[in-house]
């Protein structure tokens, strides 16, 4: 494995922020660490980057034990949530900043800096001050500055959280494009499940410092291994079967119609979300959340009697 994290533990006084965490990452993968606030995901990133000292455990990158290396000697680069750019410097000065520690001359650094600004489509902004750029442009400067030193691993700590919704989607695509172009291994921390599902090769879900599940987005969504993962990723309807085992069915997997089905109910609430519509259907035993694509036909209204079919449910 290109990255091997073994039994990582980090405490802050009596608080165990990361509890005996182990996982592996293949070369060239984009792995998202996902979880609620306070679950330990940023602590994991900072220990890999060398900004926090472990209480126990080992960190290997490309076969090298980097556990005790200072941050500046690790083969990693970090894009922080705040971008951590220098406001008094120009765009290109920010991008080439790390090269002065790598033995580059000023001329060599500027040539390489322009090349990387071209990759992130900011060459025309090279002489501007950082403070004049938009949030999305600053994000791309931070990416270029991290990539230019040729790290083996790029760490990203919620880098899209300061952007508006439309720009976040655009930057997701740009980060994926850059990752593919450089074939660089990335670990991306987020609390946004849409980001993780749309970007990651693998998702690592954390809860209270522990690993809940790791797998592809499809595995995590379709085959959650714990009730926490089921509840955290997407929406679901939980039901008990005849053996009292827990089953679930995603809202988009429920079949709804006005003629026949497993369970009769009344539409209690209708939530219009543009491309999809959510119906909350009250039955004798519980309320089911049902999702339908918006096909332009307003088939159901609040108060309608409907039938739902749960044949696509799965056992947790």
Image: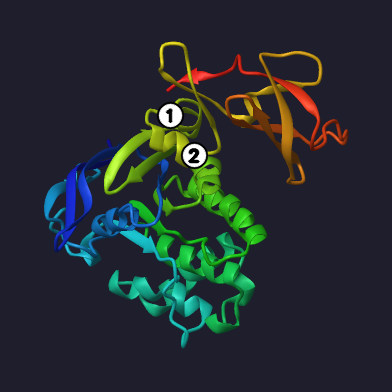
Q: Residue furthest right?
A: 297
Question: Neighbour class for label 2 at 10 Å: few (<14), some, many (≥20)?
Answer: many
Query: Where is residue 162 shown, x and y percent of the image?
Result: 53, 67
Q: Secondary structure at mark 2?
A: loop
Q: Which mark is residue 167?
A: none
In the displayed structure, does residue 105 sit left or right of residue 178?
A: left
Query: Taking 147 as reference, is 114 above or below it?
Result: below
Q: Nearer the viewer, residue 146 or 22?
A: 22
Query: Taking 60 as reference, is 119 above or below it?
Result: below
Q: Nearer the viewer, residue 257 or 197?
A: 257
Q: Nearer the viewer, residue 208 or 153?
A: 208
Do tag 1 and tag 2 residues touch (Cβ < 8 Å)? yes
Q: Tell me the residue at 39%/75% (across/down).
A: 97
**Quadrant position of residue 300:** top right
Query: Taking 153 as reference, is 120 above or below it?
Result: below
Report if residue 175 is visible in the image. yes
Q: Tell me the residue at 87%/36% (across/down).
A: 296
Spatial CA distance of label 1 from label 2 is 9 Å
Q: Secondary structure at mark 1?
A: loop
Query: Where is residue 43 shown, x and y percent of the image?
Result: 28, 58
In the displayed structure, does residue 32 sit left or right of residue 167?
A: left
Query: According to the image, label 2 marks what residue?
Result: 233
Report if residue 66 is visible in the image. no
Dot 1 or dot 2: first in sequence order is 1
Query: Where is residue 130 shown, x and y percent of the image?
Result: 53, 80
Query: According to the image, label 1 marks what residue?
Result: 224
Considering the image in quadrants, where does the C terminus appear?
top left
Query: Where is residue 286 shown, x and y percent of the image?
Result: 58, 29
């Amino acid at each position: 494995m290109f990255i091997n994290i073994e039994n990582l533990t980090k405490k802050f006084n009596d608080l165990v922020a990361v509890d005996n965490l182990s996982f592996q990452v293949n070369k060239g993968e984009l792995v998202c660490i996902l979880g609620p606030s306070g679950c330990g995901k940023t602590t994991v990133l900072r220990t890999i980057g060398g900004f926090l000292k472990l209480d126990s455990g080992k960190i290997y990158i490309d076969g090298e034990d980097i556990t005790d290396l200072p941050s500046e000697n690790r083969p990693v680069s970090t894009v922080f949530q705040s971008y951590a750019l220098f406001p008094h410097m120009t765009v290109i000065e920010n991008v080439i900043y790390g090269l002065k520690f790598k033995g580059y001359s000023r001329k060599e650094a500027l040539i390489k800096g322009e090349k990387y600004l071209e990759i992130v489509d900011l060459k025309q902004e090279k002489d501007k001050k950082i403070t004049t750029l938009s949030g999305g442009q600053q994000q791309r400067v931070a990416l270029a500055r991290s990539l230019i030193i040729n790290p083996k691993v790029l760490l990203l700590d919620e880098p899209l959280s300061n952007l508006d919704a439309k720009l976040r989607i655009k930057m997701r695509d740009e980060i994926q494009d850059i990752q593919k172009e450089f074939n660089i291994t990335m670990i991306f921390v987020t609390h946004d499940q849409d980001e993780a599902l749309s970007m990651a090769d693998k998702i690592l879900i954390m809860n209270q410092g522990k690993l809940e599940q790791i797998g592809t987005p499809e595995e995590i969504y379709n085959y959650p291994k714990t009730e926490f993962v089921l509840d955290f990723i997407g929406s679901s309807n939980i039901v008990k079967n005849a053996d009292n085992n827990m089953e679930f069915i995603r809202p988009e997997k429920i079949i709804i119609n006005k003629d026949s089905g497993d369970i009769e109910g009344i539409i209690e609430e209708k939530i219009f979300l543009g491309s999809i519509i959510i119906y909350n259907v009250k039955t004798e035993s519980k309320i089911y959340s049902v999702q339908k694509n918006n096909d332009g036909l307003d088939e159901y209204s609040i108060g309608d009697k409907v039938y739902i079919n749960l044949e696509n449910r799965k056992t947790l």
